[in-house]
Structure formats: structure tokens, C-alpha cells
Image (cartoon, rainbow, N blue to C red):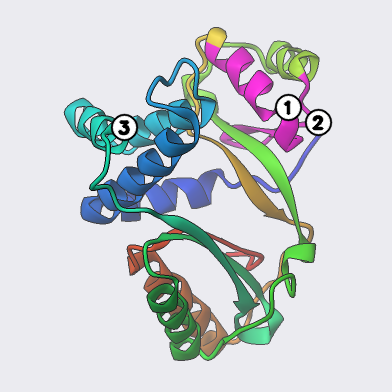
Amino acid sequence: MSGHSKFANIKHKKEKNDAAKGKIFTMIGREIAVAVKEGGPDPSNNFRLAQVIAKAKANNVPNDTIERGIKKAAGEGGGVNYETATYEGYGPSGTAIIVKCLTDNKNRTAANVRNCFTKGHGSIGTQGCVSYMFDEKGQIIIDKEECEMDADDLMMLVLDAGAEDFAEEEDSFEIITDPADFEAVEKAVAEANIATVSAEVTMIPQNYVSLTDETDIVNIQRILDLLEEDDDVQEVYHNWDE
């Protein structure tokens, strides 16, 4: 089985995130607040919170910062009420972009996201205008160098746990699941003591778009960079084949 591995992109993204920890801490704090509000402060009984904690640790967020965030979110009153907001639009040459946000002010966030698109000569579209080009899937990325299990054994492990697909790339393994089966597959990987580079429910493009015009490349990179700098933006998905 094979697929389009995101390993290189994830490593690149993490390097950029490491250079902007303030942004990561803000993102994690908001995700903790939403997860605790939805499922309580105990990660053993709140899978979403457990996933946020794992994400925080992968990005070197200190344990005391995580614990403070959970306690603050679990406290009564005084907390900021974050809402989810999703925006869809187009980059250069019809590239598709989905932006997921957590915000306490949707008007501010909408204006900021629109501005990011405009500065990169893109445009915001209506809800659903590009999401049909993506599939919502659970995606687990494993660094080959960090995995002692044989590829065939790993493939059988995750397929038995409910995975849809297993791809062996040059430097990584990629596991794809239906969102409903993601938790079971991720748990099977964790119980086998296999470290992951990334484990999340994400939006995977059905097809990728290559850009050859230098102006287009500069513009889409500008859109993505501006979105990444915005504290309200949690995730950005696109079909540009970088």
C-alpha cells in the first residue's frame, strides 16, 4: 500500500513552530480549554484532551504549563469561551485551502483570515466550496528510524485495529483510518510503545496541485505564512503539492 506521505511537511511545520513557541502555547491552551469543556479534565476519560496533551508534549510544552491550562479550564467562571470557525477559500491557480480556528471573536477572526487570503491574491469562498476536495481521515505518521517493529508486523497490527490503509514511504510509515476508528488504532500503536511524529484527525486532499509559476508559489506561501502567524488559526489544510 502506498500514499502521499506528509512526513517532510510535518517536520518542516514543527521546525517553524519551534521558532514560534508563543503561537504553539496559545494554540494548545485553547485546545485544552475546549477539550476540558467538552469532556472534563481527566485525560483517561477524555480522549480529545489526551490527544491535545500528546500534541503539547510533541511540541515541547512544559508539563506545568499543560497542568495549569487544564486547571484553568476546569475552574468555574472567568474562562474565555472559544468557538470553532472554519473558512474555505482559494489560493493561486485554484489551490484549495481550509482554515480551522478557535476564537472568542468570530468577526475579528473572519476579517483576519480574509485579509490573509487577500494579501496572497487568494479569495475566501462559501462554506463547502473546497471541502469536497478533501477526505476527513485519521492520520498517524511514524518515523522509520524511531520504530523497531518490522513493517509487515506494524501493518498487521494497525489493520487488525481498524486502519484503512498503511503506506511505507522512504523515511516514514503512514497509517490512515476512518475518523470513527482513529482512537482504536492510535491506542493500538501507543500500547505497542511505538512513538508517533503526528497522530490526528485531519483533512487529506483527494488530489494535489503543482504550482510552477514563481509568483503563484510566493503568493500561496504568503497566505500560509500569514495564517500560521494568526493566534486564532489552529489548523490549515491545502492541496498544494509543496
Q: Are marks 2 and 1 in contact (CB under 8 Å)?
A: yes
Q: Does residue 157 appear to the left or right of 232 in the view shown? A: right
**Label 1 CA crowd tier, 10 Å (few <14, some 14–19, many 20+):** some
Tell me the amino acid under the disc marked 2.
Answer: Glu
Residue 235 visible within the image = no
Residue drawn where x is 66% and y is 65% of the image: 239
The residue tagged with tag 2: helix, strand or loop?
A: loop
**Label 3 CA crowd tier, 10 Å (few <14, some 14–19, many 20+):** some
Residue 206 visible within the image = yes
Q: Does residue 73 appear to the left or right of 46 in the view shown? A: left
Residue 5, x across and y down, in percent: 64, 45
Give the magenta part as a residue range.
162-190
Tell me the amino acid under the disc marked 3.
Answer: Ala
The residue tagged with tag 3: helix, strand or loop?
A: helix
Residue 15, x across and y down, in percent: 33, 50
Say whether disc 1 or disc 3 marks the residue closer to the N-terminus: 3
Say whether disc 2 or disc 3 marks the residue closer to the N-terminus: 3
Outermost residue toward the front?
Answer: 77
Say whether disc 2 or disc 1 marks the residue closer to the N-terminus: 2
Above or below, comparing residue 159 to residue 16 in the picture: above
Report how far apart the C-alphas of labels 2 and 1 lie in the structure.
9 Å
Query: Label 2 belongs to which residue?
Result: 164
Mark 2 or 3, closer to the camera: 3
Residue drawn where x is 73% and y is 27% of the image: 181
Report how far apart the C-alphas of labels 1 and 3 lie in the structure.
28 Å
Tell me the amino acid under the disc marked 1.
Answer: Asp
Above or below, comparing residue 135 to residue 230 in the picture: above
Query: Label 1 belongs to which residue?
Result: 181
